[in-house]
Amino acid sequence: MISISEGQKIGVGITGFGVFFILFGILLYFDSVLLAFGNLLFLTGLSFIIGLRRTFSFFFQRHKLKGTSFFLGGVAIVLLRWPLLGMLLETYGFFSLFNCSGGFKAPAQWSEPQR
C-alpha cells in the first residue's frame, strides 16, 4: 500500500476543492471568480501532492512548453475575466500536456519513468 504524507493529504483536499470550484464555475455559465479560484486551488494542490520541484519540472520540460504556455495562459486569461476563452485555452493546454508522450498519463503515473 502506498503511504502518503500529511502534506499530500492536504494537497488532495485542495485539489478536490479546485476541481469542485472549476466544475461549479462552469455550471454557473463560466463564472470567472469561481473558475479563477478553482484554477489557483488546483495548481496549489498539485504542488502539495507532488512537490514544487516536480511540479515545475513537469510543466517546464522542453517538449511540454507548448501545452504549459496554453494552460498557464488560459489561467491568466481567466484571472483577467475572460472565462470562456481562458477555459478553452486551458483545455487545449491540458490535453497537450498529457498527450505529448503518445498516450494519456494520469497524475499518479507522473513519477514513473517513461518506457
Image (spheres, rainbow, N blue to C red):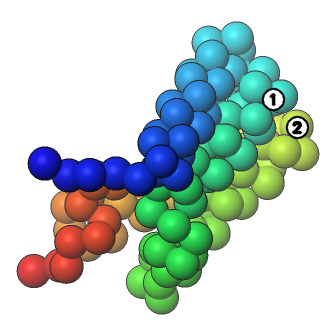
What is the secondary structure assignment of the residue under circle 1?
helix
Quarter residue 17 falls in = top right
The residue shown at (88%, 37%) is 81
Q: In what quadrant of the picture does the C terminus appear? A: bottom left
Label at residue 90: none
Q: Does residue 79 appear to the left or right of 23 in the view shown? A: right
Q: For residue 50, say whether it is visible.
A: yes
Q: Count the marks.
A: 2
**Neighbours of disc 2 within 10 Å: few (<14), some (14-19), many (20+):** some
The residue shown at (79%, 54%) is 76
First in sequence, mark 1 or 2: give its number: 1
Up-down relation of residue 49 to residue 40 (above or below) = below
Q: Does residue 81 appear to the left or right of 49 in the view shown? A: right
Q: Nearer the viewer, residue 109 or 87?
A: 109
Distance (Cα) linking label 1 and label 2: 6 Å
Q: Amino acid at mark 2?
A: Arg
Q: Amino acid at mark 1?
A: Ser
The residue shown at (41%, 53%) is 5
The residue shown at (77%, 38%) is 36
Query: Badge 1 is on which residue?
Result: 32
Question: Could you tell me residue 97's position as x and y percent?
Answer: 43, 64
Question: Could you tell me residue 52's position as x and y percent?
Answer: 58, 70
Label at residue 81: 2
Q: Does residue 83 appear to the left or right of 81 in the view shown? A: left
Instruction: Tell whether label 2 touches label 1 (CB within 8 Å).
Output: yes
Q: For residue 65, say whether it is visible.
A: no
Question: Could you tell me residue 57's position as x and y percent?
Answer: 49, 80
